[in-house]
Image: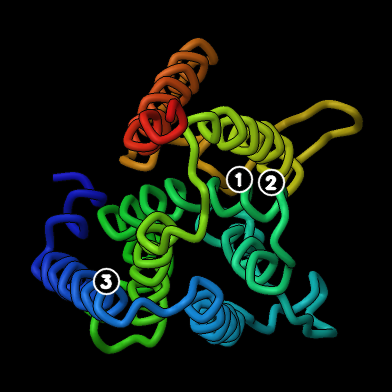
Amino acid sequence: MRAEEEYMFSVQHIVWFAICIAGIVGALYVLKTRRPSLRQVLTVCCVIAAVSEVMKLLTYTQMVPSADGSTLHLFIEWRHLPLHLCSIQIFFIFFTRLAKDSRLRETILAFMYPTCIVGAFSAILLPSIFSTTIPVSEAFRHPIAYQFFIYHSMLIVLGCYIAMSGEVKLRFSHVYSTLAILGALGILSIYTNSAFAYVTYQGNELLSVENTPNFFFTYRTPIGIQLTELWQWYVYLGILAVLVVVLVTLFFLPFRKQQER
């Protein structure tokens, strides 16, 4: 059994998954019953997102000595920067809460609708914290586990309520703007993954690359399949692109008839 499978199918992960589903269903039931405005929900999401990010900073910030050991420096590993799809949603949450009604705000909310749901669900299904931050044995003892699962559950609730609230005029044409934004962010991630890598040169010759981040999963698969040839990476990107197009299209299909009216 691979390491990814060990934490993915662990008892702790299954329990957390069940807790998240119960919390999401409960929150959506309350929202459907009370029908708060979308801005009110976004206000709560802003608070949760801010607390979540502060908790991440407190968890991941470390004191690292210089090469000669004479000084210590505060440092957060680049892979923890808010440049993953779910982390970027923080900026969108604050923008859509503070911005006035406009075509741009509508486009961003339409983008958030499928990406919050799919991105956060994928994160809960494949909790990377158990392979990169904490052992699965600390799933209920370490605060970052609570931050991770609560934050991603909140994103799913928000994505669902964007559609449920009826305040956003979702249209099938939002497929194109959503794919355009995802495509732009995906291309940008390829550059940032290289920019934040640990690179070793000898003169002008590139010798090795270590610890590249994997923003938007454009460098490595999320399930541990090794890519050893460049053509395999091209195939992986092609599969990823097709999957994104299919999922985004499916999310907006229910709004196709509304647009035709």
Distance between the alpha carbons at the discs numbered 2 and 1: 4 Å
Q: Position of residue 63 (x, y in %)?
A: 68, 84
Residue at 33 percent of width and 72 percent of height: 149
Disc 2 or 3, which lies upstream in sequence?
Answer: 3
Label 1: few (<14), some or many (≥20) within 10 Å?
Answer: some
* Count of numbered marks: 3
Label 2: few (<14), some or many (≥20) within 10 Å?
Answer: some
**Nearer to us in this view, 180 or 150:** 180
Helix, strand or loop at mark 2: loop
State yes or no: discs 2 and 1 in contact (Cβ < 8 Å). Answer: yes
Q: Which mark's residue is nearer the viewer, 3 or 1?
A: 3
**Nearer to us in this view, 158 or 170:** 170
Q: Position of residue 35 (x, y in %)?
A: 35, 76
**In this rendering, position of residue 82 left or right of residue 147:** right
Disc 2 or 1, which lies upstream in sequence?
Answer: 2
Q: Position of residue 231 (x, y in %)?
A: 50, 10
Q: Which residue is mark 3?
A: 28
Residue 212: assigned label: 1
Find residue 80 and report its image quarter. Answer: bottom right
Helix, strand or loop at mark 1: loop
Distance between the alpha carbons at the discs numbered 3 and 1: 37 Å
**Can the viewer see residue 225 in this picture?**
no
Q: Quadrant of the N terminus?
A: top left
Distance between the alpha carbons at the discs numbered 2 and 3: 40 Å
Q: Which residue is mark 2?
A: 197
Helix, strand or loop at mark 3: helix
Q: Say above or below: 192 vs 179.
A: below
Residue at 64 percent of width and 65 percent of height: 96
Find residue 164 and report its image quarter. Answer: bottom left
